[in-house]
Amino acid sequence: MTDATDPRDHERDGESPEYSVEIDDLVVRFDGDGTADDGGGTNDGDESGVTAVDGVSLSVREGEFLVLVGPSGCGKTTTLRSVAGLETPTEGAIRIDGADVTGRDPRERDVSMVFQNYALYPHKTVRGNLAFPLAVRKVPDETIEKRVAATARSLGIEELLDRKPGQLSGGQQQRVALGRAIVREPTVFLMDEPLSNLDAKLRVRTRREIAALHRRVGKTTVYVTHDQAEAMTLGDRIAVMRGGRVQQVGPPEHLYAEPANRFVAGFLGDPATNFRDGILLTDPARVETDRFTVDLADERAARLADRLDDSAGGSESRPSDSGSRPSDVTLGVRPEDLRVRAIGDSDDGDDEGPAVAARPIVVEPLGSETVVSLVFEDGNGREEFEPVADPGSDPGDLTAVVDPDRAPSVGERVTVSIPPDSVHVFDRRTGENLTSAPDPER
Amino acid sequence: MTDGNERVSYATRKRFWGVASGRVVRHLTIALGLVTVLAPIAWLVLTSLKTGQGVFEPRYVPRDPTLEAYRRVLVEAEFWKAVLNSLVVSSVTTVIVVALAVPAGYAFSRFRFPFDDAIFVGVIFSRLFPPIGIIVPYYQGIAALGLLDTRVGIIVAHIYLWLPLMVYIMRNFFLTVPQAVDEAALVDGCTRLQAFRHVVLPLARPGVAAVCILTFLYSWREFLFAFMISETLSAKPIAVAVYSFVGEVTVNWEELAAAAVVAIIPTMLVVVFFQRYVVSGLTAGALRGR
């Protein structure tokens, strides 16, 4: 599932460090008491610990902005902290600019980090905070003064220089934390959820500033967040993590369009992808659910056939009829790909795919778009919004995003059509996407 | 509007609490508390200014205020030696306790090491253990080392008595400094030791001050161990020396009072000037970064 190319290949090719940061089969296991098990000494077979990072390999190109994203506890922060040198890997290696830094102290790595709660030095002024990384490194005073002034100017915090962190607002503290990270001009910036303590409006604004800052400074950045919107907007590439493993790495658009598995499809995008269990039939390739059947578009059907041939060739063959191989799959389709039309309204002639009768139970106008939760229209379906036990699940059977001008109202009868070229077919057992395009060469 | 259970009307209750929490009542209460605390001290000071006969005269203010008692206590009875002993014992104890409690508290607040919890419980337990329970073995140990009637013997006892509590207080202070601040310093280029010195220690400075002051005060007033170890004025601190003015047959009240006033003065100065730190030390952990 991990599809990062093996960074060792590049190292063998030559010594020129094409990658700023290389993480190689990183494993971080914590003992029961929360200390990182450094793997040295006796291995007492302690299984009480937690494996926070379980074999992560990633390489970050010079100047690239890589976002580690995933739900809490997926190991993204531990991975970042391992790069910083704040966690000791149990196994694996970390290289910065081609040099193995695995056992080195944080100060010997030439990285700087922005912490979630900023971790400013409360007893120092803003000036003192900005100057500290330079002063510790015995940079001459005149240089420090110049660099601090330039950094403060670039972040618009000049008038705050003589205040203490306690006198600053959250957004201002955040800028000072950014400033402290960039003032030293390190090889790599590490950012651990730097926006999560800001309110929504400020978060979006600071997000743009970070993007602009990265464009201006052009430094390699590894950024951790649980917010898929941050990941999508900031990352040159995104690594989606779950359970200590990388699920997929690639440019945001690619991950969005061609998720490698069901988890990635569900995690990226808001509202989340619609999933519906079904059975895969071939000749022609189609997925049959209890409500509708989708014929797969040619391109996807071809990829599907390739995958199935591959796996059938292996020893791990799935239960199958020889002729048409039905297997348990899950269909995934993004809310914005669904077409919702009032019954009888058929101005969009070019729509293909199955159309299902449905009824909106919740309509949420967001201004530029409207989110509609729908239930299938057939006697035994739910007629109205009913609270469900799992607050994370969708209120209806399907969620669609529609143009506000053409949004249906609650209770109105509509048809929902599912364009075949926008559906993904996931193996229900492994979650693997059977129809996605291969990840681009990196 | 009347509630069956409401025997006293809202208006009456409001009036009652208006008076009860009003300025007059509040100030009266405070004044009463102050008198309770200050009256004995005032009496002590007045007594110390009287003569031997004047003590028994039925009046509060001495007829001829005199510092004679102070002269006799400090000079003739060589009480100044006790003052010196106390200063030496308390200062040395404070320096050693702080030097040990600060790194120990930092270690307990930041690092995991084998048996760390067990060791910390041991530290706390040694504080909870009634000191009188070990006074006999301690006496024998000090005697075996030839430290009876020496300041060193008392200092060792005081370190034993106060170090655990101070380790605990320092640990709590260090816990109020977020670990991310240490980590930021490490990433910014510090060694562990530099991070401690430049970032963590300055933030825990109120804690260090509190530990200094508390150790000094506690050591200054400690009686039991000092009483047991010291015999002569070569080691006797003030707390013990004051007691020696209580004779076999008679009590020299004016001298006892003068000695007691001398013993109180440093404590009062410390509390007056460092009140803030004393309070924050006693409520360790409640202190927030400014």
Image (cartoon, rainbow, N blue to C red):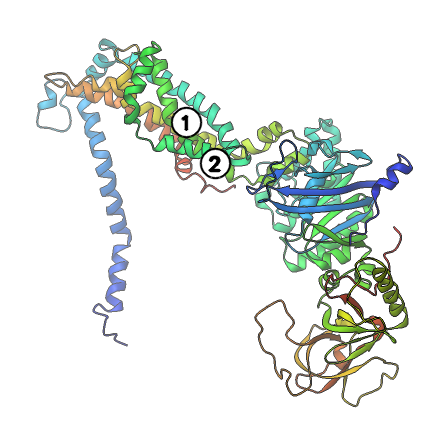
Residue ID at (67%, 42%): A28
Q: Chain of mark 1?
A: B
Residue B12, picture quadrant? bottom left
Q: How many marks?
A: 2
Closer to us: B145 or B290:
B145
Instruction: Describe residue B143's horizontal placement relative to residue B194 as left or right.
Output: left
Q: Which chain is mark 2 on?
A: B
Residue placed most toward the observer, A288 or A225 = A288
Q: Residues within 10 Å of mark 1 (few under 14, many from 20)?
A: many
The amino acid sitting under disc 2 is Asp
Q: Nearer the viewer, mark 1 or mark 2?
A: 2
Q: Is residue A273 above or below residue B169?
A: below
Q: Amino acid at mark 1?
A: Leu
Say which residue label 2 marks.
Answer: B117
| Quarter the N terminus of chain A occupies | bottom right
Query: On the picture, is B203 further left or further right than A137?
Result: left
State the mark number for residue A4.
none
Q: Is residue A248 above or below residue A160?
A: below
Residue at the disc numbered 1: B163
Using the image as rendered, state which of residue B133 and residue A191 is in the foreground.
B133
In the foreground, A247 or B29: A247
Give how far across and how far down residue A429 sits, in percent.
72, 63
Local packing at callout 2 (Cα closer than 10 Å; few below 14, some 14-19, many 20+) is few
What separation in Å lies between label 1 and label 2 (alpha carbons)?
A: 17 Å
Identify which residue is drawn at 37% across, 28% down: B270
Residue A166 position by quadrant? top right
Identify the secondary structure beneath mark 1: helix
- Expressed as whole percent of the image width and height from the top left, the position of residue B153 reads 35, 15
